Amino acid sequence: MLLQVSFDYYQWVLLPLLIMVSRIFDVSLGTLRHVLNARGVKNLSPILGFFEVLIWIVVVKQVMNAADNWMCYIGWAGGFALGNYIGLIIEERLALGMQVMRIITSKDDTELIKALRKDNHGITVIDGEGANGPVKIIFSVMKRKNIMDAEKLIAQFHSDAFYSIEDVKESSHGVFTKKDKRMQILRQLFPERKK
C-alpha cells in the first residue's frame, strides 16, 4: 500500500509569495515616502503612509496566522529586501526634486556657459581660487531629470571640468528648463508653504 502525502501548495508556496509581493509594495511605498520627505514633497507622504501601513498590517496578520511556516518568514524578508531595491528604482525613475550642480574649471569656460544658457539652465558664475590657481565656479540649480543633459554638455564642451551634484530641499525663483511640466503640475497640486 502506497503512502499518500498531500502537499499544501497554498501554505508553502502561494502564501509566502503573496507575503513577499505585499511586502515589496509596502516597503517600496515606505522607501518612496522617506525619499519624498527628504526632497521636501511632504504633502504626498500621508497618502503613501496610509497605504504602506494598511498593507503592512494585513501581511503581519497573515504571517502570525502561519507562525509555524518558515517559508512565510522567507517571503517576509525577501519582500523587504526587494521592496527597498524597487522603491529606490521607482524614485530614481520619477526623478522628482531639484539638485545643485557645481562645475569648477581652470580653463576657458565660455563655450560651456553659452551651451548651458542655450539649453535654458540658469547659471551663476563666480571667480574662485583652486589648488593650482584661479578657477571659475559655475552654479546651477536644476530639476533632477535635467542633470544628465547638463552632464552631456560638460562632456561635450569641457570634459576635464570637475563637477559635483547635491540635492536641494527647497528653492525659489530662478531659471529652469521648460522641458518637463511635471514639476509645475506638482507645485500647483502641492503649493509650497509660506515662510
Image (spheres, helix red, strand yellow):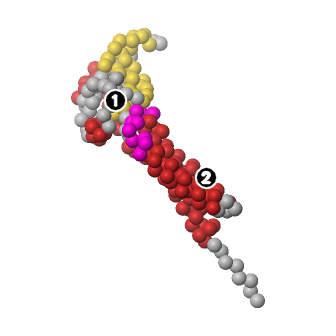
Q: Kindly report the secondary structure that dominates the magenta region of the rendered protein.
A: loop
Residue in view at x 34 percent, y 20 percent: 138
Residue 63 included in the magenta stretch of the image: no
Q: Position of residue 182 (x, y in %)?
A: 29, 41
* Residue 76, percent from left and from top: 60, 54
For the residues carrying marks 1 and 2, which lies nearer the camera in this image?
1
Q: Name the residue under label 1.
A: 193
Which stretch appears magenta? 38-47
* Disc 2 residue type (three-letter): Ala
Q: Which residue lies furthest to the right in this view?
A: 1
- Quick check: 165 above or below 13? above
Magenta highlight on residue 45: yes
87 w.r.t. 68: above or below = above
- Residue shown at 48% from the left, 39% from the top: 34
In this orientation, which residue lies closer to the viewer: 129 or 78? Answer: 78
The numbered mark at residue 174 is none
Which type of secondary structure does the marked residue at label 1 adopt?
Answer: loop
Can residue 115 be seen? no
| Residue 160 picture quarter | top left
- In the depicted structure, whether residue 126 falls above or below residue 31: above
Q: In percent of the image, x 34 and y 34: which residue is there?
A: 143
Using the image as rendered, state which of residue 180 and residue 58 is in the foreground: 58
Where 145 sits versus 22, above or below? above
Residue 77 is tagged as 2
- Specify the amino acid type for callout 1: Arg
